[in-house]
Amino acid sequence: MGWNEFYFLLRGMQWTVALAAIGFVGGIATGLLVALARTSGKRWLVRITAGYIAVFQGTPLLMQLFVVYYGLALVGLKLDAWIAVAIGFTLHASAYLGEIWRGSIEAVPRGQQEAAKALSLGYVARMKDVILPQAFRISLPATIGFLVQLIKGTSLAAIVGFTELSRAGSIVSNQIFQPLLVFGIVGALYFTLCWPLSIYGTRLERRLATAAR
Amino acid sequence: MGYKLDFGAVIDAFPALLWGCVGTLGLALGGMALAIVIGIGGVVLRDSRFAPLRWLVISFVELIRNTPFLVQIYFIFFALPLAGIKLDPTPTAIIALGVNGGAYAIEIIRGGVQSINKGQIEAGLALGLHKAQVFRLIVLKPALRAIYPSLTSQFILLTLTTSIASAIAAYELTSVAQRVESDSFRSFEVYGTVTLLYLAMSWLMMRFFGLIASRNFSYPVK
């Protein structure tokens, strides 16, 4: 394997990072809405978001990508493959992050809600200034854990036909007939992305556990 | 916007899709069995006195948990023949699923082992229980109960992961779906239906595991 092939893999890795970043940022924005709706106490909102989360957690990411990809084409939206895939990852992330943050919001002691209400803070101030900052701290390890999942998940965009790191690996492997070397390097590249995040997440979790004691 | 949904092809292929579900559950079951074997072996080695063995297990867990399953299955798919092992895609997929699930099982089972209080074992022996009784009632059952929720949700996760085995053309639901889709070009109908089939499978598994838990593990902790 020469420099040209390695450079091609790095270009693929750029797309992996870009897809994960888009999915994560999009997922943060929409996932926050899902989490707020899920904890709103309004019955129909709770039901809809609980169902939304259950569907995404009960089906394979690969199927979600396929359905979004072909579903968008069906309603007449002619989108680039990578936009369709990015939308798929955003929806996927919104459900998982929504569920993580629901847990974190509910983990904030009830007294905080009651105290904020007693101080006659409105819903927005109560959430923005009292509950969410505390929930954010609690959710951080799990959120980072999900980011690692998401980075690994972007490899499935390869099956839909999008050239990110995994598909770049398949292409190079078909060219130079050294699949073990190529997929070993591809694996190592994913590892350098994910491992530091995993370590950071575990460290945060430990710090949070000792703080709670 | 002239597209009309047509489920004809899906209805014709429905028996094949149901067999695909059987294939998926078979892959998941085989993979999970192997994962538990790897998990138990890994936990024993993980706490061994010989440091290189401990490092080996730790590196294995970190390596598997920080790389995508797609890359792992490709690697194993190409590595096995080079090691002189010639297998069909479906057994290859079971091995890959077992290796992947094994890394997670090590962490889960280790947590269960650590959750057992040594004092309780001594108390059981002091009360005159047999060693076998102590193991069954004081070690095994509480440990199983402690790891049951994470192990079963890992099982469901592994079932969803089997869809990636379609990348090496193992026999399971997603690869059956891809064949139906390429014959009929009814992509959305096929994948939409298959998504619902996966949802039904994971829902049924959740209910089943919940039922077992309420039969066996619903006694007070303290």
Image (spheres, coloured by chain):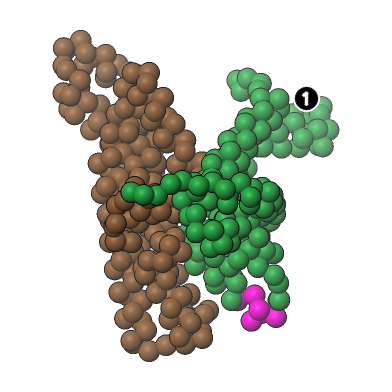
Q: Amino acid at mark 1?
A: Leu
- Residue, x 61% and y 23% (percent of image)? B221
Q: Is residue B102 visible?
A: no
- Residue, x 38% and y 40% (percent of image)? A95
**Residue A5, picture quadrant:** bottom left
Task: Name the secondary structure under disc 1.
Answer: loop
Q: Which residue is mark 1?
A: B127
Q: Position of residue A7 (x, y in %)?
A: 31, 81
- Residue, x 60% and y 72% (percent of image)? B77
The answer to whether residue A152 is above or below residue A165 is: above
The colour of chain A is brown
Q: Residue furthest bottom?
A: A2
Q: Nearer the viewer, residue B190 or A63?
A: B190
Locate residue A204 relative to residue B158 in the image: left or right.
left
State which region is magenta.
B79-84
Q: Position of residue A14 (x, y in %)?
A: 29, 68
Q: Position of residue B199 (x, y in %)?
A: 54, 40
Locate residue A19 relative to residue B171 in the image: left or right.
left
